[in-house]
Amino acid sequence: MAGSIKAVRGTRDLLPPETETWNFVEAAVRDVFRVYNFKEIRTPVFEDTQLFTRGVGEETDIVAKEMFTWEDRARAQSEKTQSLTLRPENTAGVVRAYIEHNLGEKGLLQRFYYIGPQFRRERPQKGRYRQFYQIGAEVIGPTSAGSESPAVDAEILEMLAALLGRLGIQNWTLNLNSVGCANDRPRYLEALRAALKDVVHTMCADCQRRVVTNPLRVLDCKVPADQPIIEKLPRMSDYLDESCRAHFAAVQTILTSLGVPFVVDHRLVRGLDYYTRTAFEFTHGALGAQNAILGGGRYDGLSESLGGPPAPGIGFAIGEDRLVMTLQETAGAATRPADVYIAPLGAGMNVHAALLSRELRRAGVIVTLGDESFKLKKSLETAHKLGARYALIVGENEVGSGQFALKNLGTGEQVKVARDEIADRVKVSS
Ligand code: AMP
């Protein structure tokens, strides 16, 4: 016999009750985004491959090793095949949409958020999947709209602190750095290459590759033996030009005034090429090795590198899988049980149960509906297994008298309640 088919490695099913936590997270973040006046954007799950090679950067791990890319079949002889890719991240897609729909034309800042799946062919482990979910936000617009202002960076970071607070997540660390801009980065890369020239042969294979392709990423290396070398490398902060230095200082001043704690981490660089100036990551101790809950930063040149107008921007992406994990590990996220299990008792009672459940649901009560073929004992057992707080018995006598037997499954106490008082009764004691 053929074996059963399983979900593909690195993907997983999200099942109840865990999906309750996902819904809780998404509802809470939407609430926070609303008061910061961020609006939702939904871009396609796959895009032209060039969006990522040009946007994210050919030499990044994501583009070089992790994309799910395929040649799309031509539909007609005259048509060429097109290389398509499942999005590994969403910023490039958002900026493409900004350019394509000319969203900067009104001269205003655009504040977007998104929630959705991303795809990377990474080695799966706890907290790292091939299909994972990100909640992200982007602020982008023409320079005249203030898109380069350090106030925007601070607002985004303060919003993140509010968001984590809203979810009840404490004890996070905000790591902050400035990775400079097109003006000062080349000088720094030169200094980095010079410092690495004589020592890189003693470092790990990844570092030896990165020194050629993307020397900034050497700072990201976690191999213990390389750490003493990396600690002695030149720091970006010593190479920032005057405007980048002032920008970074202003971000820190606002954050300090707002009471948002942060740590400057000179080694923080991000895995994507498009970042300029402010780069940041929030980490949480409950997560183990994959401890980054979210990351982000400025990307002042991204729109232009995708063929668009100058449109500085800043954004972040939260790993929703990791956010949910953090909640599970710290708060044991609550899921709400069903309020009432309705037990129709005997032939013809399904109709009455359906009518009553509609009334109760309209009043906001969570109802699970049983079936008239069940004996009372089986109904009560089912209600217990489901974790319902009450069982409501709907038999011929109840329907006739308008008085229903309501059993509190916690205490075992049973009372008669008039039809129009049931909703209040089960809600009052919730
Ligand atoms: P990045 O887009 O690489 O800056 O990632 C932003 C956040 O997404 C990270 O901080 C993680 O929380 C999450 N993330 C990135 N890659 C994965 C993955 N393969 N599985 C689960 N979460 C991920």
Image (tube, rainbow, N blue to C red):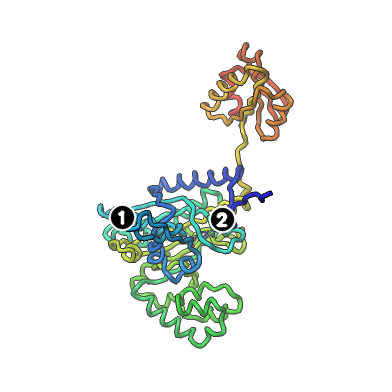
Estimate the x, y position of residue 148 in percent, counting from the top left: 33, 62
Relative to 147, residue 194 above or below: below
Q: Which mark is residue 322?
A: 2
Q: How many marks?
A: 2
The reply to whether the residue tagged 2 has its Cβ within 8 angstroms of ligand 1 is yes
Q: Is residue 411 left or right of residue 177?
A: right
Looking at the image, is mark 2 or mark 1 nearer the viewer? 1
Residue that extends furthest to the front in the rendered view of this protein? 77
Three-letter amino acid code of the residue under disc 2: Arg
The quarter of the displayed image where residue 361 is located: top right
Which residue shows up at 46% across the image and 75% down it?
216
Q: Which mark is residue 67?
A: none
Which residue shows up at 57% across the image and 51% down it?
324
Secondary structure beneath disc 1?
A: helix
Q: Which mark is residue 100?
A: 1
The quarter of the displayed image where residue 292 is located: bottom right
Q: Along the polypeptide, which appears first: circle 2 or circle 1?
A: 1
Q: Is residue 270 visible?
A: no
Secondary structure beneath disc 2?
A: helix
